[in-house]
Amino acid sequence: MTDFALEITGIGKTFSEGRGAKRVLGDVSFHVKEGEFVSIIGPSGSGKSTLFHLIGGLERPTSGEIRMDGRLVTGERGRIAYMPQSASLLPWLTVRANIVMALTIAGLDRHEAESQTSEWLARVGLAGEADAYPDTLSGGMQQRVSFLRALLSPQRLMCLDEPFGALDALTRLHMQTWLLSLWEADRRSVLFVTHSIEEALLLSDRILVLSPSPACVAREIEVPFARPRSESLWTDPLFNELKLEIYDMLKPTDGRSPLTGKR
Ligand SMILES: Nc1ncnc2c1ncn2[C@@H]1O[C@H](COP(=O)(O)OP(=O)(O)OP(=O)(O)O)[C@@H](O)[C@H]1O
């Protein structure tokens, strides 16, 4: 037995590009312990989404191994609960049907999927939206539904790929505290990609800072704040110290933002 929900060892990924090759991931190694919340932060184009595609089995690495709960799973699909950048709900299904369908595809018995969906929609204050269609919901509500879909999936490891990136600042803050309260009650293993240093510090147990492509883990930071956490952390001097430390690691060299690649 191992207490690692995920172990990434020496992962490299090179894409063929025309006649050449593009090495996106150099040599990436890290782990996520059972029940741990780990964030990945790195420059735009450093291969964060590619890493998720490898963990989800959508792509195969050029080198290295992926293990979950100690078992070699490199290239295997269906082992993670995944939440993408946009909610990607099916517009022709109601909120309830979107979640039930995802759970039955993931292997849950239909009756069980329906009862869990109703229970959780009520628990997170979305019971009133159960029969609504996704297009009629705000962006924040759509992301709540998308998160719930990942949370209820039977896979123990949740991979969240910048889930709040498209939301306005206030909705994002509400979503972060909402996610924190749900996660702190359930303690699933989470791998979380974000461009926000504050978000990573507020949510994570550890932060992995990726180098520019071909990426490796340039730095690993243990986040020292006790749980449960709240946004009041932002006034803690240590929070600001760590924020500056991470920002310095990602400092722009050519006038571009190190996180988004934009000027
Ligand atoms: N299937 C593919 N074929 C060729 N190149 C690819 C493929 N998938 C990704 N890439 C390249 O890999 C690099 C890393 O892309 P990726 O989306 O993983 O980065 P990222 O760190 O998630 O970026 P961002 O922070 O901007 O979302 C990019 O240059 C991208 O063009």
Image (cartoon, grey):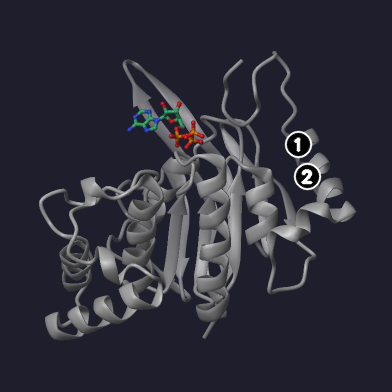
Query: Dot 1 corresponds to which residue?
Result: 247
Residue 138, how many percent across, how many down? 34, 47
Is mark 1 in CB contact (under 8 Å) with mark 2? yes
Q: Nearer the viewer, residue 120 or 61?
A: 120
Residue extending furthest toward the left: 92
Question: Residue at 20% across / 85% down in the picture?
Answer: 112
**Residue 193 horizontal/vertical position (percent):** 53, 48
**Residue 156 quadrant:** bottom left
Q: Residues within 10 Å of mark 1 (few under 14, many from 20)?
A: some
CB of residue at label 1: within 8 Å of ligand 1? no
Q: Is residue 93 left or right of residue 183?
A: left
**Label 1: element kind:** helix
Q: Residue at x 60, y 60 (%)?
A: 38
Q: Is residue 6 above or below residue 12?
A: below
Q: Which mark is residue 243?
A: 2
Numbered marks: total:
2
Quote the CA–CA distance across marks 1 and 2. Answer: 6 Å
- Structural crowding at the residue carrying mark 2, measured as other residues with C-alpha within 10 Å and reported as few (<14), some (14–19) or many (≥20): some
Residue 229 at x, y percent in the picture: 69, 68
Q: Amino acid at mark 2?
A: Lys
Q: Note whether 19 is above or below 83 in the view shown.
A: above
Instruction: Residue at 58% x, 51% y: name it.
Output: 173
Tell me if I can see residue 228 in this picture.
Answer: yes
Q: Is residue 154 visible?
A: no
- The kind of residue tagged 1 is Tyr
Q: Is residue 219 above or below residue 184?
A: above
Relative horizontal placement of residue 95, taking residue 175 as reference (left or right): left
- Give the x, y percent position of residue 116: 27, 81
